[in-house]
Amino acid sequence: MIFVTVGSDLPFDRLIRHIDLWADATQRSDIFAQVGSAKYVPQTISYSEFLEPSDFNRHMAEADAVVAHAGMGTILSALQLQKPIIIFPRRTAFREIRNEHQLATARYLSASSNIFVALDEQALLDGLNKIDTLGASDKICDFASDQLIDCIQEFIATSG
């Protein structure tokens, strides 16, 4: 199953529309999406506007791959579960977000070998067309490292 999520803050019709059209063209019936308060109504994929945290976690755990906006919560969840992930950032040019922080996140993560970053629609389609062959992501720790915690504590101590 491919789990698609747009997060809980804003709709992301552009992503959902591309997934829905791709699913129709490829006759994929194994896609479930959390679409938020979208205006676009999917015709091919199964979906829910919002998911309770337990349902989100279940879909994430059951997924063979994840497609998502460039939200860090979703990305970290996919990495913790070692799921192949395609990220497609929201863009200010399409009025999907207030600033380009998701684009910055996506560009930064594009250097990672275990995250497929799609910065435009063609790259998204390319990723979707090979989603079944994407490798699992490297597992990350469930907690911050001692080194990170020390660094943050030092920053706080010297900033005050």
Image (spheres, grey):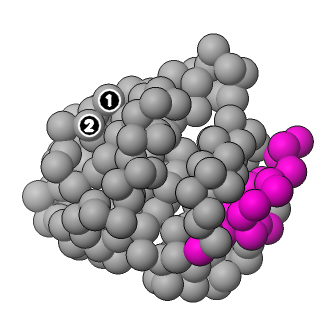
Q: Is residue 70 left or right of residue 36?
A: left
Q: Quadrant of residue 47?
A: bottom right
The residue at 26%/37% (across/down) is 110
The residue at 28%/40% (across/down) is 109
Q: Which residues are magenta?
A: 30-48
Q: Main secondary structure of the magenta part?
A: loop
Percent across and percent down for residue 149 are 22, 58
Q: Is 63 one of the magenta-colored residues?
A: no
Q: State how far apart marks 1 and 2 are (Cα).
A: 5 Å
Percent across and percent down for residue 66 are 47, 63
The residue at 35%/54% (across/down) is 130
Q: Is residue 105 visible?
A: no
The reply to whether the C-beta atoms of the residues labelled 1 and 2 are less than 8 Å apart is yes
Q: Is residue 85 above or below residue 159?
A: below
Q: Is residue 43 left or right of residue 45?
A: right
Q: Nearer the viewer, residue 126 or 83?
A: 126
Q: Which residue is mark 1?
A: 107
Report the amino acid beneath label 1.
Arg
Question: What mark, if any, has residue 110 been given in the picture?
Answer: 2
Pick the quarter of the image with the C terminus: top left
Q: Residue furthest left?
A: 147
Percent across and percent down for residue 78 are 39, 66
